[in-house]
Image (tube, rainbow, N blue to C red):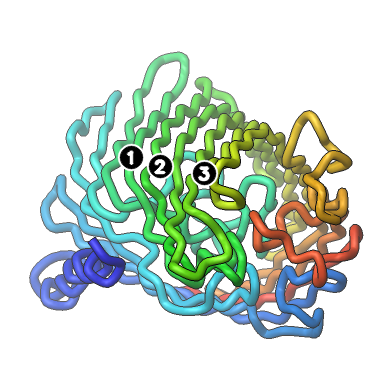
Amino acid sequence: MTNNKRLLVLVTPLLLFVTAAQAEPVSVHGFLAQGITQANGSNAINDDGDLSTALTELGINAKWNIYSRLKLSGQLVYLNGGNRYPEGVRLDYLFMDISLIDNFDHQLNLYFGRYKNQHWLYSSTRDVPFTRPSIILPQSVYYDAFRDIAVASDGVAIKGYIQQSTGELEYNWSIGATSITSAQSKILLSPAAYGKAKQEFVHQASVFWQGAGSQATYGLSFLDSNFSYAPTEYDLFYRGDVTVQRVMFNWRYQAEMWELAAELMQERMSINGFYQPELQRSQVGLGGYLLARYRFNGKLSGVLAVDYLTQNKDDKRGSQLPSGGVPAHFGYQQSAMLGASYTLASNWQLQAEHHWVDGTGRLSPSLIPDLKLNNQRYWQVWALQLTYWF
């Protein structure tokens, strides 16, 4: 199925929100966010490092309660994040939500369509500016170049809760795939990649546990995904496929005035072809972050995060990168972030943050690094964003 046909199939049910609004309960919400940002010493935002307004997020989402156990949810957004991801409109998600079990101690829902990723701490809330802890999330886990691939997938998913006297267990499972546009493939792979990149499948599972009376939640998630690349006749690259497998542990502690969150992951990436027809390469990377938020009062909060990623756990500082003049700092990326959020008025929020970064392992393109624009080991990025929601 082509991207246009796939989008048509998914968008058509969204039109039912309009015709059903008079007959059935429909809730509609949205957000508008605009900011300014700048990245010195890298192409994280743009190619020249100048001040940029490429920090725009506009979205509208709706939920239609068709029956007591049947709902339809969707969200349409416009994004402009500079080099972080392609500019334009996209359908973030559109799925049917079917309640299979609705007991006091056990709930189970089936999602069908373009379902949201429920497997990571912020994967289901990263698409809305005021529901994530920072403007730019820790890149070790929430790599911006993979934003559209990681937010949602076309397929089927389940989400369940089991209540016990000892605590609550949440379990999730999903399988699907995400269409990759030409603009996305150029950010992920290389501006010279003119072939067709495709995600063959992504299979995920996760569990979360919160003990009775505890303020801490513990989680474990698994991901298995395969991508393929079909070159054009005059392509610089070859036919190939990439397998990504991730195991991740997460933890979150929530108190009245403060919150701590952490995710630690190990990720295997195997490449067959693409660079050369007979190439076979496999490496295991490590990454994770620790994030802390403190609410000074009902309006002002602060956030602090440290983030770490190495592309290869056997070469943590990139000294053994493939020959060809690739600097060692492309093998890792670590950063510290300090930020604040202030509620100006009802439904208005102002966020500001500054990142100090060592390494370029999470700058795009990911498979063919930009050696010219990202030639500095140390660089910084700051952002200021105003958000309104309704």
Name the mark nearer the viewer: 3 or 1: 3
In what element is the residue under mark 2?
Answer: strand
Find residue 51 and report its image quarter: bottom right
Mark 1 — residue?
175
Asked if residue 253 can be seen in this view, the reply is no
> Gap between marks 1 and 2, in whole Å?
6 Å
Q: Is residue 269 above or below residue 143?
A: above
Q: Residue at x 52, y 21 (%)?
A: 211
Disc 3/disc 1 C-alpha distance (Å): 18 Å
Where 96 falls versus 10 (above or below)?
above
Q: Are marks 1 and 2 in contact (CB under 8 Å)?
A: yes
Q: Residue at x 27, y 62 (%)?
A: 63
**Separation of marks 2 and 3 at Cα, in angstroms:** 12 Å
Q: Quadrant of the C terminus?
A: bottom left
Q: Amino acid at mark 1?
A: Ile
Position of residue 274 measured from the top left corner of the image (x, y, whole percent)? 55, 51
- In the drawing, does residue 117 fall left or right of residue 379? left
**Residue 221 in sight here:** yes
Quadrant of the rendering where the N terminus is positioned: bottom left
**Residue indicated by mark 3:** 242
**Residue type for callout 2:** Val
| Element under disc 3 | strand
Residue at the extreme left: 23
The front one of 349 and 121 is: 121
* Vertical comparison of 167 with 373: above or below: above
- Residue at 80 percent across and 52 percent down: it is 330
- Along the horizontal axis of the image, is 247 left or right of 153? right
- Mark 2 lies on residue: 202
Mark 1 falls on what kind of element?
strand
Furthest residue in direction top, as rendered = 166
Is tag 3's residue or tag 1's residue first in the polypeptide sequence?
Answer: 1
